[in-house]
Image (spheres, rainbow, N blue to C red):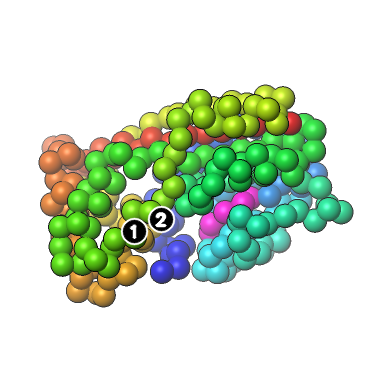
Amino acid sequence: MDWSATQYLTFEDERTRPARDLLAAIPTRDPRRVVDLGCGPGNTTELLLQTFPKAEIIGIDSSPDMITNARTRLSGISFAVADLTTWRPDPAAPVDIVYTNAVLQWVAGHETLLPHLLGLLPAGGSLAVQMPDNLDEPSHVAMRTAARAGPWSHKLAGAEGSHTPIAPAAAYYRMLKPHAARVDVWRTVYHHPLDGLDGIVEWFKGSRLRSYLGPLDPSEREAYLAAYRAALAPHYPFDAGGKVLLAFPRLFIVATR
């Protein structure tokens, strides 16, 4: 099930705020080239272009749909479909910043991948990473509960493993500090008012729910989402205006060589 850029951008403002917060913490100034690794539909790439107008900005994503939308959004930027784990910069075109927002939670092997990405940069270059850290939030526990509760359980047996568990902040600090002059790690919890339980469903249809909906046929998807809403309900009370508050923790890392 390929990513849907349209679904992902349903909550563009909310999804872009952590990207701005990550960008603001990068100490590298006047970079020659910046790579948006896992650029999605180009919303974060646009931020990089605004922040570093003199730099060459390059967007990389594994989803053809995302790259198609990114090229439409930013026609003057170089975009490419590539495997994020095997991407390498052109040796003749050094990269000063690797920026990866809300993507590495889908990739295993952080203990080797992150030091590798940092090692691709010159002295003074920065690796900037933001990852959702919400596998233990009610929104995600409910996905697993609904997956196990229905006749589709055998189809969804592998869905949980598609998202890499996020290690404690201290683990990422220890992982990167031997290779960096400076490592900043912090965790922020964002609170998003959404339109009831359907708002939560629509939010995660653009990300985590893909792993659960992809293996199901259309009728099973509807039944699964009904079970998911039922599992969500005790944890997300409605306010007087029909809103629920979605807590969304995110882990940030900026490592500079």
Query: Label for residue 159?
Result: 1
Judge whether residue 134 can be spotted in this image.
Answer: yes
x, y (%) of residue 65? 51, 68
x, y (%) of residue 118? 69, 39
Mark 2 burial class by Cα count in 10 Å: few <14, some 14-19, many 20+: some
- Residue visible at 16% across and 49% down in the picture: 231
x, y (%) of residue 163? 41, 51
Q: Is 2 drawn above or below residue 135 in the view shown?
A: below
Near-viewer residue (131 or 72): 131
Q: Which residues are magenta?
A: 36-41
Left or right placement of residue 238 versus residue 26 in this view? left
Near-viewer residue (180 or 23): 180
Determine contact: label 2, label 1, CB under 8 Å.
Answer: yes
**Label 1: which secondary element:** loop
Residue 70 picture quarter: bottom right
Secondary structure predominantly adopted by residues drawn in magenta = loop
Residue type at tag 2: Ser
For disc 2, the marked residue is: 162
**Label 2: which secondary element:** helix
Q: Report how far apart the C-alphas of labels 2 and 1 lie in the structure.
A: 6 Å
